[in-house]
Image: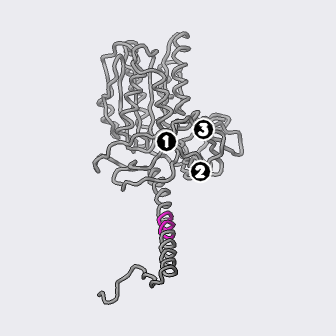
């Protein structure tokens, strides 16, 4: 079974701008999932009851379910090394085609990389801004793909405002210039909710084998998918397929029975049932660590569009009044018991409840 999924750990404190700060009692894990049938076609009409989530083999309670087109914060990471010189124009056109096919409320940034990684287009929802800034004519140098992913993850975490976060890496080479290690990138994948898609434009067979191993592993660990078009002319079709896949995911939030943020690795499995055979692909799991919250943003910097976190916050806030009422009832009961004991032991009048004293006006 295969479900395409991305995981988000939501401590639910300070996640949305202009929300009052509070500490929720229940941590939620959010899974973004894509389901396909035996023909490879997307299945987008399943109900909540069709899904079952397991963490470390134990069934988990689902608290939130949505199947609408939720906007994303998307990073386009484009190889700009010397070997990409003849491919850049078609890669840029495919990236723009993906942007046009995306949700209009998506925010997208462009990071080019060769020996060094650089963000050339900061987050924008304006395709014309992407068109103006995506072009490069200086393809040169080696391939520092892991450094690019490291930088993109940090930028996405600090500046992304949408509930879902995705990276698309397009490269024709094997990493030969990064400082960041594969272990570092994989650990980030375990701790963060970013889903990584990849497009490998490899030529000879040896490069295909070596390049595919790293891209496949990265995509699998994050819940994304890697594509290897037969030629550069097929990249448009791949880009549009990725855009369609991103827009047709289910969002499932569950409350893990093990709420501890103890740094341990939690294996996740998502099962789905239906009238036909359905394939489910999901990341292997996540690492239960506390993610540092981003700095608060100015009101003009944030556009809240999907409401997924709003629903999660609502779930948490609904628990708070019940907890307050329970604590208040326990306090009242204890105070009444103390007053009664004082009356029995000391023989003094039972002190009155809160209210104005005699003679007060």
- Mark 2, Cα crowd under 10 Å, few <14 / some 14-19 / many 20+, is some
Q: Which sits earlier in the primary sequence, circle 2 or circle 3?
A: 2
Please give the label number shown on residue 8.
Answer: 1
Task: Return the residue at label 3.
Answer: 268
Q: Quadrant of residue 142?
A: top left
Residue at horizontal 52%, vertical 21%? Answer: 229
Report the span colored magenta. Answer: 322-329
* Residue 129 is inside the magenta segment: no
| Residue 327, x across and y down, in percent | 49, 66
Residues under numbered marks 2 and 3 in contact, where contact means CB atoms less than 8 Å apart: no
Q: CA distance from mark 2 to mark 3?
A: 13 Å
Query: Which secondary structure is most common in the magenta stretch?
Result: helix
Q: CA distance from mark 1 to mark 3?
A: 12 Å
| Residue 131, x across and y down, in percent | 32, 31
Residue at horizontal 65%, vertical 36%? Answer: 279
- Mark 3, Cα crowd under 10 Å, few <14 / some 14-19 / many 20+, is many
Task: Return the residue at label 2.
Answer: 62
Please give the label number shown on residue 25.
Answer: none
Residue at horizontal 54%, vertical 50%? Answer: 66
């Amino acid at each position: 079974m295969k479900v395409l999924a991305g995981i988000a750990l939501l401590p639910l404190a300070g996640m949305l701008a202009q929300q009052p700060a509070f500490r929720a009692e229940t941590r939620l894990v959010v899974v973004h999932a894509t389901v396909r049938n035996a023909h490879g076609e997307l299945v987008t009409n399943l109900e909540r009851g069709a899904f079952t989530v397991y963490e470390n083999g134990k069934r988990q309670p689902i608290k939130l379910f949505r199947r609408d087109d939720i906007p994303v914060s998307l990073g386009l990471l484009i190889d700009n090394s010397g070997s990409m010189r003849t491919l850049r124009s078609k890669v840029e056109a495919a990236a723009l085609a993906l942007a046009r096919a995306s949700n209009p409320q998506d925010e997208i940034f462009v990071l080019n990389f060769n020996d060094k990684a650089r963000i050339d287009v900061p987050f924008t929802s304006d395709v014309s801004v992407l068109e103006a800034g995506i072009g490069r004519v200086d393809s040169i140098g080696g391939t520092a793909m892991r450094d690019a992913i490291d930088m993109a993850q940090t930028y996405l975490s600090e500046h992304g405002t949408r509930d879902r976060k995705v990276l698309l890496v397009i490269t024709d080479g094997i990493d030969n210039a990064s400082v960041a290690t594969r272990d570092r990138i994989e650990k980030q994948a375990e701790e963060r909710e970013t889903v990584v898609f990849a497009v490998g434009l490899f030529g000879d067979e040896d490069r295909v084998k070596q390049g595919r191993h790293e891209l496949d592993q990265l995509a699998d660990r994050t819940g994304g998918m890697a594509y290897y078009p037969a030629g550069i002319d097929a990249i448009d079709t791949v880009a549009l397929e990725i855009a369609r896949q991103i827009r047709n995911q289910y969002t499932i939030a569950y409350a893990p029975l093990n709420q501890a943020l103890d740094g341990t690795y939690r294996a996740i499995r998502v099962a789905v049932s239906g009238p036909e055979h359905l394939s489910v692909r999901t990341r292997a799991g996540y690492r239960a660590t506390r993610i540092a919250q981003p700095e608060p943003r100015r009101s003009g910097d944030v556009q809240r569009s999907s409401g997924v976190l709003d629903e999660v916050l609502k779930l948490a806030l609904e628990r708070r009044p019940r907890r307050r009422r329970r604590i208040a009832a326990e306090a009242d009961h204890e105070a009444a018991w103390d007053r009664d004991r004082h009356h029995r032991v000391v023989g003094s009048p039972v002190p009155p409840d809160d209210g104005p004293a005699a003679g007060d006006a």
